[in-house]
Image: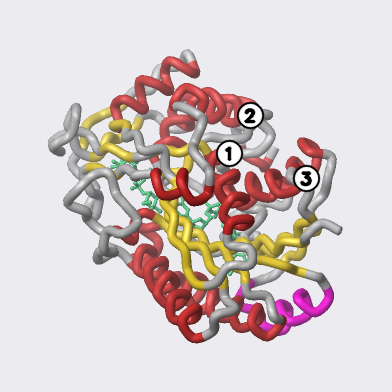
């Protein structure tokens, strides 16, 4: 019999791509999502792509009664935990929402897991926990830094509480996956990133400029010590990221303690390189203006992906061109996201 995996936040951007990868690999999937930042349409599309359906439960990770019922009625063997809030600016304005959803929500989830005897957990962390590293590329053994906002602090807090939890009970087997910058969409163009309102992140912003929804991109700073003065990041295709989750899930089975892996490509690109690559892939102009730096941004950030390669047997395989053409396919086929 195949394993059943609980995917919290499975209707969202990364969760929906990972749900698809799990279904394609033969797992049964239960998605728990409160839909605060997603549409159930994403899971309908997942079913269209692979011909298999995840079971969807609309609910909240902070709801202990619901979680207890869920674990009692489904034979869950592991949890992929994506649910949470992720907008950096909003986290400054509404810190309590971030600590409640991301930190308290994770505590409640872990309590329900322990109660049900489910001890295998894969957590969506972020390269933001490294703070402002002085050396590139970033390795997992670099010290964690001081995140500059409540969102980043909430991710670091959850990492630390999961470390404490694993020290207290050896049955826990936990993966902390530190994502670099997830971009792209499934090659079918049926699922992708569908941000609420005006996007905060670079690629969704660029693609909405290309489609004509937004007038021009603001490039935040061109005076960094980088190749062309603009910020450099390690962009990783969401399908590669999804594959990394499956490898982590399998690798920590039967294990004990906490393992940490960077999920990145090891290659950095500047904002202007991203603009150029997107124009090339889409055939559309992406007008931009240079504006001052965005507070809290670092100059550059890219991963050393060697540990994930050695221990997970996983490597990102999709390059910049594929990230751009898949983003464009999704954006042009779904100009209003899942709304139409
Ligand atoms: P997303 O907003 O698309 O997905 C998160 C999902 O969780 C949404 O469907 C939302 O409705 C759901 N959710 C939020 N709070 C919930 C709650 N209390 N109970 C139940 N469901 C809830 O975001 P994403 O980009 O897919 O990110 C997934 C995870 O990866 C998040 O934890 C995020 O912090 C982390 N992450 C994302 C990035 C990125 O750039 N996208 C980078 C690093 C880490
Ligand atoms: N940028 C612009 N204009 C925009 C948006 C972004 O110039 O309109 C620039 C930024 O200054 C940065 C780069 O594009 O140099 C990438 O910015 P994003 O906002 O897309 O991504 P960040 O690296 O700032 O942050 C992302 C996630 C965070 C996560 C962090 C570290 O949004 O949640 O990566 O993993 F914490």
With 254 as the anchor, is 320 left or right in this view?
A: left
State whether residue 28 is above or below residue 189: below
Residue 30, given in percent of the width and then of the height, sits at: 75, 61
Q: CA distance from mark 2 to mark 3?
A: 16 Å
With 44 as the anchor, is 205 left or right in this view?
A: left
Determine which of the numbered discs, if any, sits on residue 44 in the image.
3
State whether residue 124 is above or below residue 276: below
Q: Residues within 10 Å of mark 3 (few under 14, many from 20)?
A: some
Tag 1 residue: 239
Badge nearest the viewer, 1 or 3:
1
Quadrant where the C terminus sits is: top right
N-term-proximal mark, 1 vs 2:
2
Q: Residues within 10 Å of mark 1 (few under 14, many from 20)?
A: many
> Which is nearer the eye, 139 or 206?
139
> Which is nearer the eye, 88 or 30?
30
One can see residue 199 in this view: no
Tag 2 residue: 187
Residues in magenta, as a range: 61-73
Q: Badges 1 and 3: C-beta atoms under 8 Å apart?
A: no
Q: Residues within 10 Å of mark 2 (few under 14, many from 20)?
A: some
Query: According to the image, what is the colour scheme of the structure?
Result: secondary structure
């Amino acid at each position: 019999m195949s394993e059943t995996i609980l995917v919290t936040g499975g209707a969202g951007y990364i969760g929906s791509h990972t749900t698809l990868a799990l279904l394609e690999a033969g797992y049964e999937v239960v998605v728990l999502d409160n839909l605060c930042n997603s549409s159930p349409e994403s899971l309908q599309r997942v079913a269209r792509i692979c011909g298999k359906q995840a079971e969807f439960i609309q609910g909240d990770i902070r709801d202990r009664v619901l979680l207890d019922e869920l674990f009692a009625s489904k034979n869950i063997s592991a949890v992929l935990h994506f649910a949470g809030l992720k907008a950096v600016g909003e986290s400054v304005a509404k810190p309590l929402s971030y600590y409640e959803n991301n930190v308290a929500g994770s505590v409640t989830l872990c309590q329900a897991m322990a109660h049900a005897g489910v001890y295998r957990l894969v957590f969506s962390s972020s390269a933001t926990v490294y703070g402002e590293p002085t050396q590139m590329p970033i390795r997992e053994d670099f010290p964690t830094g001081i995140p500059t906002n409540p969102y980043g602090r909430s991710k670091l807090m959850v990492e630390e509480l999961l470390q404490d939890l694993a020290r207290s009970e050896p049955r826990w087997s936990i993966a902390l996956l530190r994502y670099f910058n997830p971009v792209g969409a499934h090659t079918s163009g049926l699922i992708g990133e569908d941000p609420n309102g005006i996007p905060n992140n670079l690629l969704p912003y660029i693609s909405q400029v290309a489609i004509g929804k937004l007038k021009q991109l603001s490039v935040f700073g061109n005076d960094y010590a980088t190749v062309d003065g603009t910020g450099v990041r390690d962009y990783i295709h969401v399908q590669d990221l999804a594959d990394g989750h499956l490898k982590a899930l399998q690798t920590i089975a039967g294990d004990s303690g906490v393992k940490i892996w960077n999920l990145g490509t090891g290659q950095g690109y500047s904002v202007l390189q991203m603009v150029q690559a997107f124009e090339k892939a889409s055939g559309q102009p992406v007008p931009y203006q240079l504006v001052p730096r965005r507070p809290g941004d670092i100059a550059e950030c890219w991963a050393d992906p060697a540990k994930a390669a050695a221990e997970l047997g996983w490597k990102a395989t999709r390059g910049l061109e594929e990230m751009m053409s898949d983003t464009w396919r999704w954006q042009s086929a779904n100009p209003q996201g899942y709304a139409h």
